[in-house]
């Protein structure tokens, strides 16, 4: 799981990658912000990507770990 900041709305969200159990060719799959729908990125995978808003607890943990 990776945490992203949307380039458009600046909200945090998490990205989870799912791989198919058998190997196959990789295709470019989109990663869209779950808040505003902005196309954040595209990455190659043999599965798919899902993006979810962070919970309040996850936001607090992210902010705590982000500070120097």
Image: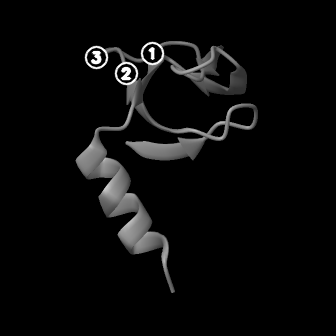
Percent position of residue 31, x then y: 60, 22
Residue at figure coordinates x 41%, y 30% from the top left? 53
The mark lying in front, picked from 2 and 3, is: 2
The image quadrant of residue 29 is top right
The mark lying in front, picked from 1 and 3, is: 1
Task: Please state which of residues 29 and 34 is positioned toward the viewer in this rendering.
Answer: 34
Q: Could you tell me how far apart the alpha carbons at marks 2 and 3 are, in whole angstroms? A: 6 Å
Residue hosting label 1: 47
Percent position of residue 60, x then y: 32, 58
Specify the quadrant that holds the N terminus: top left
* Secondary structure of residue under mark 2: loop
Crowdedness of circle 3 by 10 Å Cα count: few (<14), some, many (20+)? few
* Secondary structure of residue under mark 1: loop
Tell which circle, 1 or 3, labels the residue nearer the N-terminal end: 3
Tell which circle, 2 or 1, labels the residue nearer the N-terminal end: 2
Residue at figure coordinates x 58%, y 23% from the top left? 33
Along the horizontal axis of the image, is 1 left or right of 56?
right
Residue hosting label 3: 21
Percent position of residue 5, x then y: 61, 44
> How many numbered marks are there?
3
Residue hosting label 2: 19
* Secondary structure of residue under mark 3: loop
Residue at figure coordinates x 45%, y 45% from the top left? 2
Asked whether the beta carbons under mark 2 and mark 3 sit within 8 Å of each other, the answer is yes
Along the horizontal axis of the image, is 47 left or right of 45?
left
Residue at figure coordinates x 28%, y 17% from the top left? 21
Relative to 37, say whether 64 is above or below: below
Q: Could you tell me how far apart the alpha carbons at marks 1 and 3 are, in whole angstroms? A: 9 Å
Task: Please state which of residues 4 and 67 is positioned toward the viewer in this rendering.
Answer: 67
């Amino acid at each position: 799981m990776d945490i992203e900041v949307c380039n458009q709305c600046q909200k945090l969200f998490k990205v989870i990658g799912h791989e198919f159990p058998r190997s196959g060719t990789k295709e470019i799959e989109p990663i869209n912000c779950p808040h505003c729908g902005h196309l954040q990125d595209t990455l190659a995978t043999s599965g798919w990507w899902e993006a979810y808003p962070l919970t309040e607890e996850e936001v607090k943990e992210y902010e705590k770990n982000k500070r120097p």
